[in-house]
Amino acid sequence: MKKLKYILLIIIVLFALQLYIDANYIEISSFKVLSDKVPESFDGVKIVHLSDLHSKEFGAGNKRLLKKINDIKPDIIVMTGDMVSASDTNFDVFLDLARNLGMRYECYYIVGNHELDLSKQYYDEIMESLEKSGITILDNEKIVLERESDVLNLYGMWYNAKYYMQSDLTSDVIEQIIGKDDDENFDLLLTHNPKHFETYVDWGADLILSGHVHGGMVRLPFIGAVFSPERTLFPKYSAGAYEKDGGTMIVSRGLGRGTTGFRLFNRPEVCVITLENSK
């Protein structure tokens, strides 16, 4: 009986240690995206993708996260939403991080469902602070990134919260939200929820960067993600790279745990995407 107690104690300690590691030790995941539509001047461009911080702090002032990013030396940083939580009343953790990043890098940001659930006062406060920090907010719009004589289209899309729980988002609806895709040039779409991957590709996206699913919170060998924010099990798109008809989606496992979540076998993640011209 005593031996069984010791075994149970060891299991509990190991489980608690794993939870601590999976909440606090950042993992870098690297991806290469090859396409003949990547302009020559963008060949080798390195994008750091951050998502779902939920006001998580990795060391005072997020110094451990900043060091990871600075070591990567990205050309561009994109943030795909839920960098704060809807229940927050203080946003200093994220806004301080944004100020640090905005001083050094070309940064782009879209909102997720948690930002959309904030009061208008809090929402406006965050947007104003991000703009002052030099962060470009993509509010259902497209901007054109230019290098030498080449261009790449960057779209940022959020959409009605009903599409988080339903499956009726169509390419026509996307076109109404952010316009028609550009067939000639490379189209990079930032959108928080990966659920509609096939629709994003049908619309015309060459590369989609998303988050939202937190890697499924729990990741099991041979199974992958267990949970989804939509309160379903085993989400189809939860982490890593997916391909369909020439389009690629990279889903970040995110950095935080959400308001009531946890992470198991699923460390916080910074994604690094390198664009390569395949011609």
Image (spheres, rainbow, N blue to C red):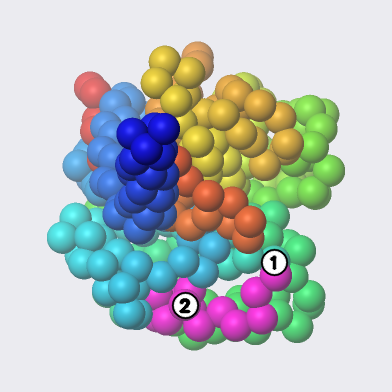
Count of marks, rendered view: 2
Compare residues 258 and 42 and report the one nearer the observer. 258
For this view, does 45 lie left or right of residue 22? left
Residue 91 belongs to magenta span: yes
Compare residues 208 and 177 and report the one nearer the observer. 208
Residue that sits furthest to the front in the current view: 1
What residue is at 50 percent from the left and 36 percent from the top?
A: 218
Compare residues 7 and 53 and report the one nearer the observer. 7
Q: Which mark is residue 93?
A: 2
Occupied quadrant, residue 102: bottom left
* Position of the N terminus by quadrant: top left
What residue is at 47 percent from the left and 77 percent from the top?
A: 93
Q: Which amino acid does label 2 sit on?
A: Val
Residue 128 belongs to magenta span: no
- Image height of 119 relative to 19, above or below: below
Q: Point out residue 129 in the picture as x, y percentages from the top left corner.
A: 54, 83
Q: Point out residue 242 in the picture as x, y percentages from the top left corner.
A: 45, 23
What residue is at 64 percent from the left and 49 percent from the top?
A: 157
For this view, does 272 lie left or right of residue 110? left
Occupied quadrant, residue 41: top left
Q: Which amino acid does label 1 sit on?
A: Ala
* Position of the C terminus by quadrant: top left
What residue is at 25 percent from the left and 61 percent from the top?
A: 69
Q: Name the residue under label 1.
A: 86
